[in-house]
Amino acid sequence: MTVKPRPAPSGKTSPGTAEADLAFLRRIVEGGSGRGQIPMGVLFLAGGLLYGFQCLFHLGQAAGIVRIPDWASLIFVVSVTLVMLAVVAWAVHYGRKFGLKSSAGPTVSRAMDGAFSATGAANLAIIVVFGVGAARDNDFAIWLYYPAIVFAFQSIAWFVAWTLKRKPWMGMVALGHWSTAVALGLLVRDPIAYTWVCAAALFLLFALPGWIILREARAAQAAA
């Protein structure tokens, strides 16, 4: 005769059910399945690589290694921007396709998305301020303060991310952005050193974190 297991009494949970519930709550706190972080990872990775290589391109021009006509250089710069805009369009489409809305996601993910979105919105205002100032005063060095402000804003966003998730690499990225902002602000009159700092920061503080975000998102998605 087969003895059937007795169901757990009402109001109580078995150890297996409790473990499943804890795992479910942990996934919520850590950011769900990870799919929502894929667009952010792609944007950081693409932006860091594209503009990092653009900085290397300009350094090559300054060193005399890259010798092409001005029109060809302009085409290259415009192409980098167009490719980045295409990546942004893909990220927006990806979010709409899979219904990735920050208001519907976990609290931690919503807070992180809000911090980075607010940083992007502030950058638009800074573009106008420094762009108009540089054109009005006919001083390109004024415009060079803009990237320094971008890195400063990014340091705030990454500090928020570190505060929420307490991942050491996020804290290091926040510190790196802060240091880069200070360095760029001091090097606006030294274009070569300024461009080298930009190139290094784009690869280490944009492309590398983007790759880490993508790797973690894929791992979380596979585990879910």
Image: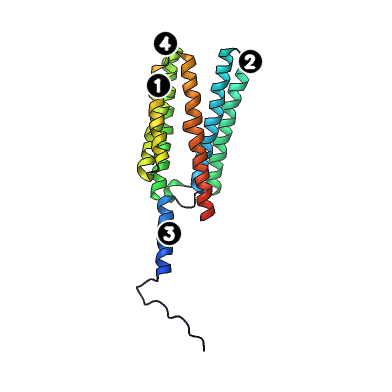
Q: Looking at the rendered structure, which numbered label has been put on residue 163?
A: none
What secondary structure is marked by label 4?
A: helix
Please name which of the two marks, 2 or 1, marks the residue nearer to the observer.
1
What secondary structure is marked by label 3?
A: helix
Q: How many labels does the image show?
A: 4
**Type of amino acid at the residue the image marks with label 4:** Asp
For the residues labelled 4 and 3, the Cα–Cα distance comes to: 58 Å
Left or right relative to 87: residue 179? left
**Type of amino acid at the residue the image marks with label 2:** Trp
The residue sitting at 46% across, 52% down in the picture is: 32
For the residues labelled 4 and 1, the Cα–Cα distance comes to: 23 Å
Residue topped by disc 1? 183
For the residues labelled 2 and 4, the Cα–Cα distance comes to: 26 Å
For the residues labelled 3 and 2, the Cα–Cα distance comes to: 57 Å
Q: Decide: marks 4, 3 in contact (CB < 8 A)?
A: no
Q: Which of pointers 1 and 3 lies earlier in the amino acid sequence?
A: 3
